[in-house]
Image (spheres, helix red, strand yellow):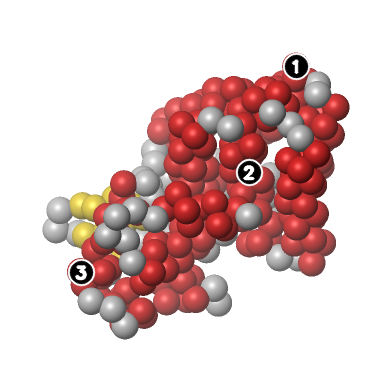
Amino acid sequence: MADKRKAGQAVKRGTTAVDMRIYKAVVNAVMSHRLPPGPHLGEADFCELYQVSRTTVRKALQRLAHDHIIELRPNRGAVIASPTPREAREIFAARRAIEREIVPLVIRNATPESIRHIRAALAAEDAARRSGDRAGWIRLGGEFHLLLAQLAGNHVLQRFMQELVSRCSLIIALYETPGSAMCENDEHQNLATLIEKGKVKEATHLIEHHLLEIEARLRLAEQDKKVNLAEVLSGR
């Protein structure tokens, strides 16, 4: 469900299956923390990896830049965005403000079907955690928050969340404490229970606490990581 939602949001006039494949590969690598901020993304590398033209690669890179996943820099080309510690704090503050609005809307619009979607998302997240699939767990943790944004029924908030979750994933990839996880599954479970019970005040407090805890686990100092683009985009 989440993959279909993201694909639907991403498709714009002129977008092809190939450049969408590049776009989604980079986003998924960021969401899974396999592609941290800083590395240069060479057009030639993408052309070789996907056997496509530079025109196709540039379309994907332009969309990634529009969504703040990468930065297009003069004389350097595309690089994964590297938010500063100050930007990181501002982005988390914006996300807390948005999710404080989303949670009451999710509760207000809750239906048996929406609760089933939430529980299914949590089951997938828990399965990834128990299997030791840390990358999958991290990705699904972000998708849980995007699902709540969808269930809130406000398309503007949903678009904001798509950007904020991606940018938070960049921040976490850059600043996370070794061994920590993006989201604790128990907090997601507790939040789902509060949503199901219609506890607006408690659920809103929990989402804010949850995001503050994630931010508190970050080491807001500059990091420098080197990656192999072919490896991270292939998932190896």
Going by the numbered disc 1, the residue's amino acid type is Lys
Q: Residue at (27%, 68%) from the top-left corner?
A: 57
Of residues 79 and 207, the one nearer the viewer is: 207
Q: Residue at (41%, 33%) from the top-left corner?
A: 87
What is the C-alpha distance between the residues marked 2 and 1?
20 Å
Q: Quadrant of residue 80?
A: bottom left
Of residues 152 and 178, the one nearer the viewer is: 152
Q: Is residue 191 above or below residue 181?
A: above
What is the C-alpha distance between the residues marked 3 and 1?
50 Å
* Labelled pair 3, 1 in contact (Cβ < 8 Å): no
Of residues 9 and 40, the one nearer the viewer is: 9
What is the residue that sits farthest to the left in this orientation? 75
Label 1 sits on a secondary structure element that is helix
Going by the numbered disc 3, the residue's amino acid type is Thr
Going by the numbered disc 2, the residue's amino acid type is Leu
Label 1, on which residue? 201
Q: Residue at (20%, 69%) from the top-left corner?
A: 55
Question: x, y percentage for residue 104?
Answer: 68, 22
Question: x, y percentage for residue 29?
Answer: 50, 62
What is the C-alpha distance between the residues marked 3 and 2?
33 Å
Q: Using a 10 Å C-alpha cutoff, classify the residue at mark 1 as few (fewer than 14 neighbours), some (14 to 19) or many (20 or more).
A: few
Q: Is residue 20 above or below residue 54?
A: above
Label 2, on which residue? 147
> Which mark sits nearer the N-terminus, 2 or 1?
2
Task: Tell me if residue 176 can be seen.
Answer: yes
Label 3, on which residue? 55
